[in-house]
Image: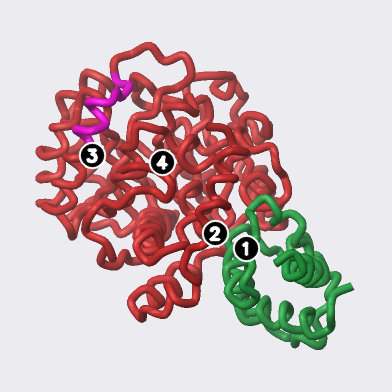
């Protein structure tokens, strides 16, 4: 399970980059499906990925995009990548 | 190259590149990035409106394969209902294409009333009412002599200009074939004198095509040089960029260069076009296995402008590795939006020279 700080930061990046309204990092449901429920598409996701790569100094392979379905899974993915560094 | 290899190459080019935040720190780049990213909400699908056309062209993709035999649905209420259901599943942009949408203006109107962003591919012979506020892509396949020979259409360019001069919806799409490369000079002179705007397409052979229009290495190189020349000569009338030139005149087709993301070549339904794109026939049916923007085109030979608009744009990640590659991508996306979206105005190209695709030679 990812650290709360990572969860909040991922949520914050999503809110900022996708200009989501009526939600804060604290109220962002970490298990809401970004594609099915928020309607995020590949261009949005790529934008978020580019910001996450900068923020955490990791590389996110395009093949891994389908794994990044919600905030929790993204945070888990980031922490796993940081461990592998 | 297959899809898997292309994706791997994309990932590798992403490693060790500049930070994205550094690339967009340049105010000019950031401004263009913010301009184009506002349109990332566009989700397209395409629709054959009718089986009929008022001309018949050599190499027309519509009259290949089974789709031409679909029974027409001419009921505007059915089209309106389809658009409502498309809207519900997230489609925000429609492309009305085969065979000739201007022959069914009431169906175009039904689509526009529900989904107001889109474009229509037309030969321009018959004017589409102004109440249909989509972009209109008017096809040009050489000068009037060539049009008469290939399309059996007399005085086509003059008729197109008469119908669409000063119409902000209109973009002339000049398709370069192996036989009409030099004719662009004459056509562009006429278009520019009438204040018309044009973009470029490349003839992309349908599956099994045996005619004379298919490009080879020599004509690709000549087309590249001609496009750059015309772009320099008519900067106010041509919607294109040097990176468009590179992407569409490369010896490899778009699929080999960028890994086509349309369902026909992309088995993944996780996200993006593979998930949302559909290509409807005139009877409102669709089949994922053959869905792409130019069905029945030979994918190896595909350099089609519609395909590139989606496929190159989708490869943001691959281009976000250094400032030059990213500027090239921004020029491409800025061009695509100006060609396809009503009210979007193209900016000055950030690069005035050709630059190679990441991971490829020029």
Of the image marks 2 and 3, the number of the one nearer the N terminus: 2
Q: Nearer the viewer, residue B116 or B211?
A: B211
Query: Please, is residue B347 above or below residue B234 in the view?
Result: below
Tag 4, which secondary structure? strand
> Judging from the image, what is the letter of the chain drawn in green?
A
Percent across and percent down for residue A62 are 63, 54
Q: CA distance from mark 4 to mark 3?
A: 24 Å
Left/right placement of residue B291 relative to residue B137 reads right
Of the image marks 2 and 4, the number of the one nearer the N terminus: 2
Residue B80: give its label: none
Q: Where does label 4 land, which residue?
A: B121
- Residue B217 inside the magenta-drawn segment: yes
Q: CA distance from mark 2 to mark 3?
A: 31 Å
Q: Colour of chain B?
A: red
Residue B15: give its label: 2
Query: Please, is residue B86 above or below residue B268 in the view?
Result: below
Q: Where does label 3 land, which residue?
A: B224
Q: Answer whether labels 2 and 1 touch (C-beta < 8 Å).
A: yes
Q: Which residues are magenta?
A: B213-223
């Amino acid at each position: 399970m990812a650290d709360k700080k990572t969860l909040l930061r991922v949520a914050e990046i999503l809110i900022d980059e996708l200009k989501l309204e009526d939600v804060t990092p604290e109220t962002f449901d970490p298990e809401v499906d970004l594609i099915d429920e928020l309607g995020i598409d590949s261009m949005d996701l790529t934008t978020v990925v580019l910001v996450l790569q900068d923020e955490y100094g990791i590389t996110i392979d395009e093949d891994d995009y389908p794994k990044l379905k919600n905030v929790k899974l993204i945070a888990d993915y980031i922490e796993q990548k940081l461990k592998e560094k | 190259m297959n899809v898997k290899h292309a994706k791997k190459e994309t990932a590798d080019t992403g490693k060790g590149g500049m930070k994205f935040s550094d690339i967009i720190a340049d105010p000019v780049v950031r401004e263009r990035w913010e301009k184009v990213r506002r349109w990332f909400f566009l989700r397209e699908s395409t629709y054959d409106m009718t089986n009929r056309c008022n001309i018949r062209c050599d190499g027309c993709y519509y009259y290949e394969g089974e789709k031409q035999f679909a029974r027409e649905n001419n009921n505007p209420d059915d089209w309106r209902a389809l658009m409502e259901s498309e809207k519900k599943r997230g489609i925000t942009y429609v492309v009305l294409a085969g065979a000739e949408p201007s022959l069914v203006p009431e169906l175009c109107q039904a689509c526009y009333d529900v989904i107001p962003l889109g474009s229509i591919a037309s030969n321009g012979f018959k004017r589409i009412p102004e109440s249909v506020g989509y972009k209109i892509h008017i096809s040009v396949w050489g000068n009037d002599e060539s049009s008469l020979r290939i399309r059996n259409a007399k005085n086509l360019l003059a008729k197109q200009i008469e119908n669409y001069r000063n119409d902000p919806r209109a973009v002339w799409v000049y398709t370069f074939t192996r036989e009409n490369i030099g004719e662009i000079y004459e056509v562009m002179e006429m278009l520019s004198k009438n204040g018309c705007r044009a973009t470029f397409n490349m003839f992309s052979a349908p599956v099994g095509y045996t005619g004379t229009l298919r490009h080879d290495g020599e004509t690709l190189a000549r087309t590249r040089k001609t496009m750059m020349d015309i772009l320099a000569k008519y900067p106010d009338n041509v919607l294109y960029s040097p990176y468009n030139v590179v992407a569409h005149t490369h010896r490899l087709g778009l699929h080999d260069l960028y890994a086509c993301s349309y369902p026909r070549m992309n088995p993944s339904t996780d996200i993006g076009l593979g998930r949302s794109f559909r290509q409807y026939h005139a009877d409102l049916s669709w089949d994922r296995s053959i869905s792409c923007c130019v069905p029945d085109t030979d994918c190896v030979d595909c350099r089609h402008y519609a395909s590139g608009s989606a496929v190159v744009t989708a490869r943001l990640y691959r281009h976000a590795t250094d400032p030059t590659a990213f500027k090239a991508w921004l020029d491409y996306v800025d061009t695509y939006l100006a060609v396809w979206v009503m009210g979007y105005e193209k900016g000055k190209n950030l690069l005035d020279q050709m630059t190679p695709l990441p991971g490829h030679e020029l």
